[in-house]
């Protein structure tokens, strides 16, 4: 059994075809097919059922695939360790991406505590929004991310690290007119007032909490979003910790919209790719956060 054979087998399973596997790991399709056949011949088992349109795992293939994934992950981790040891005292930066909405006080405290305990590890911190956080992992621009569950699937390992409260807000001078004597604002009353959204582009369709009809303004960050709402130029759902002072000082008020998720709470996660081994620095951060939280994870 060779590592190249395992990589070929795993690529076929994950990509769904021999052709896609060849493209994914930059091999020829005949070499992928030969590698899988060599594994089957070595152990005298059939790993893939090739009778259907796409190859599917047999019962033996499922068991073999699960162990193959674990072995390949360990190999990747060993390779990272070898590179790290070869570099001697030279440290690599820890590349983190944090969702813009997730810079809550507990998350910032975790970062500060890690930096205090590991002053020798430099942190390269970037922020993104919605699915952009997970895209940072896929593009290998970050190795660990912190954010909500946008885009999470079986490719990811994740640990819950906190909660985020979201609430609908508007300028106080607008609320009475929008409510029109009712307890909740009807959606139609908001159609002429822009809903302000943080987006990487005005065309993206990642938002879950938007009115089906009405004007929308797209901005690049939550500070711009907050500024516009406080100026009475729109309404928005905002992380509560960002607007707590504005609510207390009366610059913003909570708003309940009829048949709309005006207020909600959802978990925040520390995330990495399941098939990508962490660097020495990434492992240090991952284990530090898990130790600090002492909570169950989404890790197998």
Image: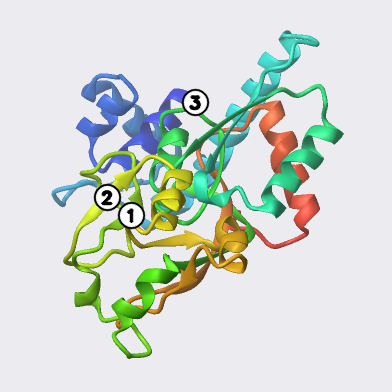
Q: Nearer the viewer, mark 2 or mark 3?
A: 2
Tell me where residue 178 sits by quadrant: bottom left
Work out how far the residue at label 1 is from the one at label 3, CA to CA, in angstroms.
50 Å
**Gap between marks 1 and 2, in whole Å?**
5 Å
Q: Which residue is mark 3?
A: 3
Tag 1 secondary structure: strand
Q: Position of residue 285 (x, y in %)?
A: 72, 38
Q: Earlier in the sequence, mark 1 or mark 3?
A: 3
Point out which mark residue 217 bears. Answer: 2
Report the mark closest to the observer, 1 or 3. Answer: 1
Distance of label 2 from label 3 (alpha carbons) = 51 Å
**Image coords of residue 110 (percent x, y):** 74, 46
**Do tag 1 and tag 2 residues touch (Cβ < 8 Å)?**
yes
Q: Position of residue 18 (x, y in %)?
A: 23, 34
The answer to which of marks 1 and 2 sits earlier in the sequence is 1
The mark found on residue 196 in the picture is 1
Q: Within 10 angstroms of label 2, few (less than 14), some, or many (20 or more) residues? A: some
Q: Is residue 234 above or below residue 218?
A: below
Label 2 residue SS:
strand
Residue at horizontal 69 percent and vertical 62 percent from the top: 296
């Amino acid at each position: 059994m060779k590592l190249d054979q395992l990589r070929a087998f795993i690529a076929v399973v994950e990509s769904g075809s021999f052709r896609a596997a060849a493209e994914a790991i930059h091999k020829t399709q005949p070499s992928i097919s030969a590698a899988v056949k060599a594994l089957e011949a070595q152990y005298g088992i059939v790993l893939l059922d090739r009778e259907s349109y796409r190859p599917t795992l047999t019962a033996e293939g499922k068991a073999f695939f699960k162990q193959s994934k674990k072995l390949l992950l360990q190999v990747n981790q060993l390779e990272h360790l070898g590179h790290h040891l070869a570099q001697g005292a030279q440290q690599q930066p820890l590349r983190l991406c944090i969702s813009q909405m997730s810079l809550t006080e507990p998350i910032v405290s975790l970062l500060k505590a890690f930096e205090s305990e590991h002053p020798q590890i430099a942190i390269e911190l970037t922020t993104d929004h919605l699915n952009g956080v997970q895209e940072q992992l896929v593009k290998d621009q970050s190795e660990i991310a912190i954010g909500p569950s946008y885009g999470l699937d079986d490719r990811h390992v994740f640990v819950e690290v906190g909660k985020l409260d979201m609430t609908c807000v508007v300028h106080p001078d607008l609320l009475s007119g929008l409510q029109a004597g009712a307890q909740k604002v009807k959606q139609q009353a908001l159609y002429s007032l822009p809903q302000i959204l943080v987006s990487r582009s005005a065309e993206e369709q990642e938002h879950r909490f938007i009115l089906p009809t009405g004007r929308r303004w797209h901005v690049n960050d939550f500070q711009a979003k907050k500024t516009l709402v406080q100026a009475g130029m729109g309404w928005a759902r905002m992380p509560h910790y960002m607007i707590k002072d504005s609510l207390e000082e009366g610059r913003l008020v909570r708003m309940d919209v009829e048949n709309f998720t005006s207020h909600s709470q959802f978990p925040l996660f520390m995330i990495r790719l399941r098939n990508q081994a962490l660097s020495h620095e990434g492992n240090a951060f991952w284990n530090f956060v898990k130790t600090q939280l002492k909570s169950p994870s989404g890790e197998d």
